[in-house]
Amino acid sequence: MSAEEPLQTAKQSSGLLQRIEHWIPKVVVAPTFIMMLVFIYGYIIWTGVLSATNSRFLPSYDFVGGLQYEKLFENPRWETAYTNLALFGGLFIAICLFIGVTLAILLDQKIRREGVLRTIYLYPMALSFIVTGTAWKWMLNPGLGLEKLVQDMGFENFSFDWIVDPDMAIYTLVIAAVWQSSGFVMAMFLAGLRGIDNSIIQAAQMDGASMPRIYWRIIVPCLRPVFFSAFIILSHIAIKSFDLVMAMTGGGPGYATDLPATFMYAHSFTRSSIGLGAASAMLMLGGVLAILIPYLYSELRGTRNG
Amino acid sequence: MAALEIDNVRKVFGGKTEVLKGINISIENGEFLILVGPSGCGKSTLMNSIAGLESITDGQIRIGGEDVSGRSPKDRDIAMVFQSYALYPSMNVRDNIAFGLEMRKVPKEDRLNEVNRVAKMLQIEHLLDRKPSQLSGGQRQRVAMGRALARKPKIYLFDEPLSNLDAKLRVEMRTEIKKLHQNLGTTIVYVTHDQIEAMTLADRIAVMKDGIVQQFGTPQEIYDEPANIFVAGFMGSPAMNFIPAPIQKEQGQLVAKVTTAGGQTYSLPLGKRGENLEKYEGRKVILGVRPERISEVNITEVEREDVVVVKTKTEIVEPTGPDTLIHITLNGVEVGCRVAPDSAVKAGEDMEFMVDLSKAVFFDSETEARI
Amino acid sequence: MVNHHMAQRTWGFWINRGIIHALLISAALFYLLPLVVMLLTSFKTMDDIRAGNLISFPAEFVIEPWIKAWSSACTGVKCEGVGSYFFNSVQIVVPAVLISTALGAINGYVLTKWRFRGSELFFGLLLFGCFIPFQVVLLPMAQTLGWLGIANTTTGLVLVHVAYGVAFTTLFFRNFYVNIPSELVKAAQLDGAGFFKIFWRILLPISGPIIVVTIIWQTTQIWNDFLFGVVYGSGETQPITVALNNLVNTSTGVKEYNVHMAAAIIAGLPTLLVYVLAGKYFVRGLTAGSVKG
């Protein structure tokens, strides 16, 4: 080594400076940590506390135990809300998965204009549910919407008034929600398909399998993790569904299309029964956890197994 | 003066896993130290501890006589070349090399001079404006070395720097590093799992396993006088043969008995190496013979008294070009022999081998330490 | 793909292709229809709307619905169009996106390159924040905003969006930085760079893609938010989604569908534009944001 002075200054940081350096990372994440503790966990506990009080227009702290939950389950509107959620969620998830996987497979057949089609399928995901709801509310308008379009095409007796029919309105929500989210599911499946090793398909072809059989027996089973993730995301969207209902039906006719999210909003902010609203919110959280915890459990186990 | 002293260093992870179990190593200024061992032996942890990237639980690390154990990496006056090169992707080669100087507030002009000096030395002047992503593996390697050289630290640390290169380039760069070390007289600590790199580059080798230095010495010492079976088996390729053999006394001389697959028994004289084996008479030891010491019969050497000719069936014959490896069986274990290609026979045929015991070593079959 | 090009190009092959294309194109029409209908309707007069049908072409193109939607349509009590609410949304989105992205970046950096005891637990707890239904925090947050004196202000909404967006942004950056070799940070440490220098000089310059993904994701999320907007905003400070909903659902009198559609397009335009301009990053964000790393 040359004898000249080393280029760097040999100054050493003092013990104090080193200790500060040691603390910097923790100090930097502290704001987020505090926000998380307060705004997520603190508030969940707070809501839990509220759900055990008789709060009405304003939060009060007269504890009534599980009374609000009892009231909730005696409330026919809540019953409608969660049955609706089961119906809406089930259909929404099933149809989205079906359309998603079908479109993805069709699109994976070396289609020349794939990019354009993909863009078209996916753009609704960029829109707000309010915009989607507004558009579909208009499309489904009895009298001026699709009904009239089909009548103009020569089917004079065609009638399509689901959006104002208490028994059918919930299905209009499914249509709009599927329109918005199925393209995204398609994108997930397409990514999954592209991730499958091509040599598996080639090997199956050598074995003499036909393309539909290859898809059904080999490729779709490979997409199991995607089905799983898509299911989680879609059920998450379904449970949180609020905007779409507000924009399309406002929960009506009557409260025929109420979902837990709109129930919670209505009771907390317009019907002055905060206690009941809080109880419904806690049950929504419970619903999410019931889906999420098995998912996370299997995910974690999966990563541990390699 | 000792450039680097590692004094009884221990490292415990999470209060239970002991990764370094009291390491003692000391090297002089200008020496090339190689830490070698299988993965998980603690060599990388030791290197990171020298760099200050990991703290040590116990003991002391001194660089140039100063205790640096508690200091942060930047205050230890060391530079490191990483296995992945760790070139800063957003900076061009010039800025990569100058970054360390910039952080140490060296004036811009001096930085540029230094970059140019290093670039010239490593012949990467034409690459200075490129981004790391535009460089080949070998070029990245040079830049990584340049970055270390520009800093002129007391010690250079190399963490498996050649393992991402293809075989041909690896040999080239190996020579290059050796040349650099000879020309600059730098002190280098170099981690590798490749025993050929260790043999070719090092002034001193520390062979590690399970967080313990198994042997610390010059390459030749480690090759010829391995401290135990692990070191003997790890250094050298193809590996040393380990033949369990009973020691007996014949005509006042200690011999090791070996039996071929065909049932023929030979007595191998221990010669002067056998002096320490008196108390093993009648017991089994592990006889260590390197493959190059079992070769075709050579008339000029066959007369020596520590040479024995053994005739047996060849099992597998593997030509490598310069010589041919032949597998035979002695005392029930597979034994590799290195013979000249011209004298190799076909697999399955009998052949005469000359076993040269002048460099043979013996290990206690229980402790596995060399006797 | 053995013989794919020779043997299979029979009649059967072409019929197959025909069916596939027909299905794909009808799906495309399904997705496009609402957008086309919205556009057509927004350029029609109300008489034209009543006379024609959803996909009939406007008898004459009129721009009035757009002008009315922007500046004079009634959104509840007021009749000033959605224009001012559009700017409310901008006022909420810009600071909220910038702050949450910055926090996410530095958090991701710490959680991957400066792990400390408990940092994994911290990340796990934070990740959970991506999944909670926001209904469970609505009531306490309303009260807190009141105490802080920022209820019914855009500042309040910025705070809310930062608080609940930072879990996502942290997730994005963490998953990006976890694939950046830690040796880069070690090398920079040996070169003498400290915590912030390493972040600023080494990591941030290579974070371009993930910054774009995060900004796009956050922009879409916050722009499209309705729940927080309707609960914590009121009157003057509401974001555009709330104004649009009011326009469509609470206005009395004759429903002006052309104005509704124009307003809906105005509300959807910014995110649609982001999607068209940076679709690749948009999709990447969707996948990253929903499929946990």
Image (cartoon, rainbow, N blue to C red):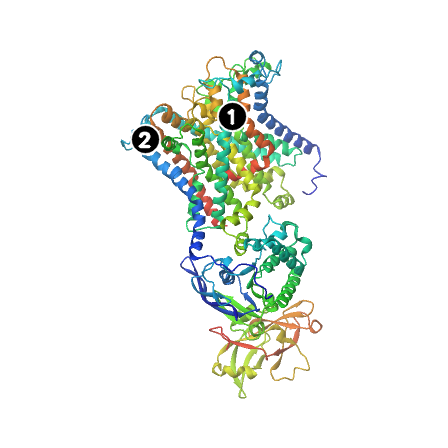
* Contact flag, marks 1 and 2 (Cβ < 8 Å): no
- Dot 1, crowdedness within 10 Å: few (<14), some or many (≥20)? many
Residue A191 pos. (x, y %): 57, 39
Residue type for callout 2: Tyr
Of the two numbered discs 1 and 2 in the rendering, the one whose residue sits closer to the viewer = 1
Taking the image as shown, residue B183 lies to the left or right of residue A188, namely right
- Dot 2, crowdedness within 10 Å: few (<14), some or many (≥20)? many
Residue B233, relative to residue B141: is it above or below? below
Residue A97 pos. (x, y %): 52, 33
Q: Label 2 lies in what chain?
A: A
Residue C148 pos. (x, y %): 38, 33
Q: Give the total number of marks visible in the rendering.
A: 2
The numbered dot on residue C228 is: none
In 3D space, how far apart are the residues under numbered discs 1 and 2 (Cα atoms)?
40 Å
Q: Dividing the picture into quarters, in which one does residue B151 lie? A: bottom right
Front residue of B362/B194: it is B194
Does the rendering let one see residue B72?
A: yes
For the N terminus of chain A, the quadrant is bottom right
Residue drawn at point x = 70 percent, y = 32 percent: C11
Residue C243 pos. (x, y %): 48, 23
Does the rendering let one see residue C292?
A: no
The numbered dot on residue C86 is: 1
Residue type for callout 1: Phe
Front residue of B185/A206: it is B185
Residue C67, relative to residue B68: is it above or below? above
Q: Dividing the picture into quarters, in which one does residue A72 lie? A: top left
Q: Which residue is mark 2?
A: A69
Q: Label 1 lies in what chain?
A: C
Residue B127, relative to residue A258: is it above or below? below
